[in-house]
Image (tube, helix red, strand yellow):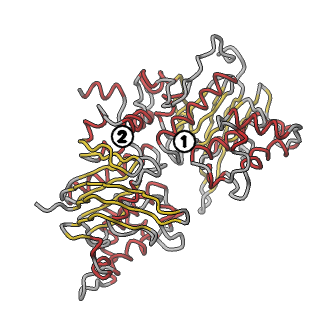
């Protein structure tokens, strides 16, 4: 039986100014019709290069060797006209980063309709009525209302944009869909919805699915088999359940360990890191009797939408962060987490309520607010956007001390880089952001915050855009900073595994309200609120308790 997709000894080399760079070497993969295959690996492993080679979507600098057989036909031997006919109609791609893949100035219905018009069979050009009907049908297939066809991308949530990308990929009824990181940076509820849509389409339509991800639990929830890539080579391929339960290759083990199972005692206070963690101090600085370091008291923040309707972004929130503790603020996109963070930092004025630091109300302006912001520092979600591409590491870290007029600037920068574990710090001073890896860029952002010797870090999704192993190292850094320096942190996240890995307490936010607060064990192992239960139920890898119950 002819495979839907078969790669035979696939190799890809990129021509660069410094010579040829082999990106993929000797990859053999097979996918039958109606099958599902996950390809896992970190940035630079070659997984996206493999995916893009299937439809010859690689840049001109790429040289492909071996065979890429689509239903027995070698894609590398196809003429342009045949290749154009194959794209979308026989195989399509759900590209990574829906916000960047969609045209921001065109309505999503028009973008879904484009491949329907361009790739219609000869002599069968559809009428406008047929196109509109097909767009409506596609939106319904991905669980979006037909009214969304008239929306622009910025008017949709992250999950809705990702579903539009899936609808586009299905527009011409292909037999093969390649999904490149379709759930990256989505919260667990939306991630579960997107995975459900893909699984339903595979089951109902019998399409073949190749999914690319660095998250093994996501692949295991959707795919029958998983292939792991490392340094351009395929190092392991096995049925999903087998690979998840007993990975053989060291890189497979590292990927599995990077995303802990909530409830697993082995991963409690134990992020995946190559550097041993320091022991817990015998005495912690904060206690329940002490006044909280940072507190929100009955905080309310409202906005108005286009129609003038009042939106309660933060609705009567009470939250405390004590000295020497990490609090995880969890909730899905749109729950009000970031608005609350902006209000705590003094970047958003509350309608009512009070923010207190060390027992005193935070000033609304002037020197008092400036002094407060030195004590509470922000670590942004995306290090690439947070850093000025024209500024060296030294300039990025020195900005805060300069604004606050601190002496001994160079010593402060070197000390901050050392605390952020960029060693030796002198090696990094003259580097620009593009010369650093993703993890190194995030460490520079953290160093910029540490340069002012704050008492508390407010970290907004600090590992959402990072690879699996890098994620563990950054989480370990935050835990080390607490244990060594007594540094408190409020970590905003949609990742419950992060909370289980490093947090002392958890606060769950839903529609502007804190619906549940307590220790990590209380909230994640014995949830009281239905929303907390739904977050745990949406985890692709489940929880330790659920896994044990299923056995």
| Residue extending farthest top | 282
Quick one: quadrant of the C terminus?
A: top left
* CA neighbours of label 2 inside 10 A, class few (<14), some (14 to 19), many (20+): many
Q: Is residue 117 above or below residue 456?
A: below
Q: Is residue 390 above or below residue 501?
A: below
Q: Which mark is residue 175?
A: none
Q: Which quadrant of the view contains residue 248?
A: top left
Quick one: quadrant of the N terminus?
A: bottom left
Q: Residue at x 64, y 25 (%)?
A: 482
Query: Whole-percent x and y of residue 228?
Result: 34, 45
In this rendered view, identify the residue nearer to me: 26 or 87.
26
Name the residue tied to disc 2: 217
Query: Whole-percent x and y of residue 218?
Result: 36, 44
Q: Is residue 53 left or right of residue 412?
A: left
Q: Residue at x 50, y 74 (%)?
A: 106
Name the residue tied to disc 1: 463
């Amino acid at each position: 039986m002819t495979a839907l997709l078969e790669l035979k000894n696939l190799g890809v080399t990129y021509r660069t100014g410094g010579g040829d760079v082999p990106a993929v070497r000797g990859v053999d993969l097979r996918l039958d019709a109606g099958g599902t295959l996950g390809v896992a690996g970190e940035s630079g492993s070659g997984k996206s290069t493999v995916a893009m080679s299937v439809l010859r979507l690689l840049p001109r600098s790429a040289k492909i060797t071996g065979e890429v057989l689509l239903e027995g036909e070698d894609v590398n031997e196809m003429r342009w006209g045949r290749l154009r006919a194959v794209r979308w109609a026989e195989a399509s791609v759900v590209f990574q980063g829906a916000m960047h893949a969609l045209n921001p100035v065109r309505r999503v219905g028009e973008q879904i309709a484009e491949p329907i018009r361009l790739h219609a069979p000869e002599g069968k050009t559809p009428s406008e009525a047929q196109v509109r009907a097909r767009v409506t049908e596609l939106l319904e297939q991905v669980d979006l209302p037909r009214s969304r066809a008239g929306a622009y991308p910025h008017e949709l949530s992250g999950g809705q944009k990702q579903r539009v990308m899936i609808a586009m990929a299905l527009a011409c009824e292909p037999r093969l869909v390649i999904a490149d990181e379709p759930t990256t940076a989505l919260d667990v509820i939306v991630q579960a919805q997107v995975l459900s849509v893909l699984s339903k389409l595979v089951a109902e339509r019998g399409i073949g699915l190749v999914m690319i991800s660095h998250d093994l639990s996501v692949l295991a929830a959707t795919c029958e088999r998983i292939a792991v890539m490392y340094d351009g080579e395929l190092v392991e391929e096995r049925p999903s359940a087998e690979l998840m339960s007993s990975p053989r290759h060291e890189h497979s083990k590292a990927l599995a360990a990077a995303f802990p199972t909530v409830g697993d005692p082995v991963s409690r206070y134990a992020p995946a890191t190559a550097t041993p963690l320091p022991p817990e101090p015998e005495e912690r600085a904060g206690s329940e009797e002490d006044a909280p370091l940072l507190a929100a008291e009955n905080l309310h923040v409202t906005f108005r939408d286009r129609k003038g309707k009042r939106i309660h972004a933060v609705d009567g929130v009470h939250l405390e962060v004590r000295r020497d503790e990490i609090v995880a603020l969890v909730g899905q996109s749109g729950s009000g987490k970031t608005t609350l963070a902006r209000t705590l930092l003094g970047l958003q004025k509350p309608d009512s309520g009070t923010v207190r630091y060390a027992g005193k109300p935070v000033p609304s302006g002037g020197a008092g607010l400036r002094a407060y912001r030195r004590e509470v520092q922000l670590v942004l979600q995306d290090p690439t956007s947070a850093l000025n591409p024209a500024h060296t590491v030294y300039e990025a870290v020195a900005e805060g001390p300069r604004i606050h007029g601190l002496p001994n600037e160079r010593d402060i920068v070197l000390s901050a880089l050392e605390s952020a574990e960029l060693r030796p710090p002198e090696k990094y001073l003259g580097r620009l952001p593009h010369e650093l890896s993703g993890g190194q860029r995030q460490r520079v952002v953290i160093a910029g915050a540490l340069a002012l010797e704050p008492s508390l870090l407010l970290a907004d999704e600090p590992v959402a855009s990072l690879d699996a192993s890098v994620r563990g190292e950054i989480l370990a850094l935050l835990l080390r900073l607490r244990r060594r320096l007594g540094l408190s942190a409020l970590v905003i996240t949609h990742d419950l595994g992060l909370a289980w890995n490093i947090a002392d307490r958890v606060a769950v936010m839903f529609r502007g309200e804190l619906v549940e607060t307590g220790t990590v064990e209380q909230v994640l192992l014995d949830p009281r609120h239905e929303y907390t239960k739904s977050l745990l139920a949406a985890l692709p890898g489940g929880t330790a308790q659920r896994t044990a119950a299923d056995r």
